[in-house]
Image (cartoon, grey):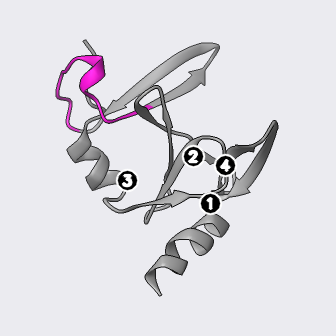
Amino acid sequence: MPHCTFCNVERDENDFYMHSSHKVNGREQKGYTCKSCSDLHYGDTWYPIEGYNEKCDISKRGTVRELRNGRYYNITYVQNAGKQYVYLSKGDKDMRKNVGSLMKKYIYKNQI
């Protein structure tokens, strides 16, 4: 059974709130996060990113999650220089978006 990456609690795979999947040396490595750890580490306030095919949200801390098959997946990537970006799809076209610009557009707009 998988366990939470942060608190190391072992649960059924369907009981986790957020999932991540990364390819490391040709293998797929999965990470699981329970709801309390997700709120603590990724931000407890989520804002919807409007206008894209999938259900995507961004947190105050700059993490972007996507709802797929009833589960949230972390879709934030980090470049070598520390810049964060995500791939969002609109229609049939995938677009690479800077997380900082998404935060300005969706988070700071809602706080004013």
Label 1 element class:
helix
- Looking at the rendered structure, the kind of residue marked 3 is Tyr
Alpha carbon of mark 4 to alpha carbon of mark 1: how far? 15 Å
The crowding category of the residue bearing disc 4, from other C-alpha atoms within 10 Å (few below 14, some 14 to 19, many at least 20), is: few
**Left or right for 32, reference 103:** left
Span highlighted in magenta in the image: 7-19
Query: Residue 53 or 59: which is nearer the viewer?
Result: 53
Q: Which mark is residue 76?
A: 2
Q: Which residue is mark 4?
A: 52
> Residue 47 placed where, x, y %?
46, 62
Mark 4 vs mark 3, CA separation in Å: 21 Å
Give whichever of discs 3 and 1 has the lower sequence position. 3
The answer to whether marks 2 and 1 mark residues whose Cβ atoms lie closer than 8 Å is: yes
Q: Quadrant of the N terminus?
A: top left
Mark 2 or mark 4, which is nearer the start of the sequence? 4
Within 10 Å of disc 3 (Cα), the crowding (few <14, some 14-19, many 20+) is some
Residue at screen point 62% across, 48% down: 78
- Distance from the alpha carbon under mark 2 to that under mark 3: 11 Å
Along the polypeptide, which appears first: circle 4 or circle 3?
3
Which numbered mark, 4 or 2, is in the foreground of this view?
Answer: 4
**Where is mark 1, residue-wise?**
99
* Foreground tag (4 vs 3): 4
The correct choice, above or below, for 66 with respect to 49 in the image is above
Q: Quadrant of residue 10?
A: top left
Say what amino acid the circle numbered 4 marks: Tyr
How far apart marks 2 and 1 lie (CA) works out to 8 Å
Relative to 38, does residue 1 appear above or below in the rendering?
above
Residue occupying the point 68% across, 49% down: 79
Q: Report whether 50 appears left or right of 79.
A: left
- State the residue position of label 3: 42
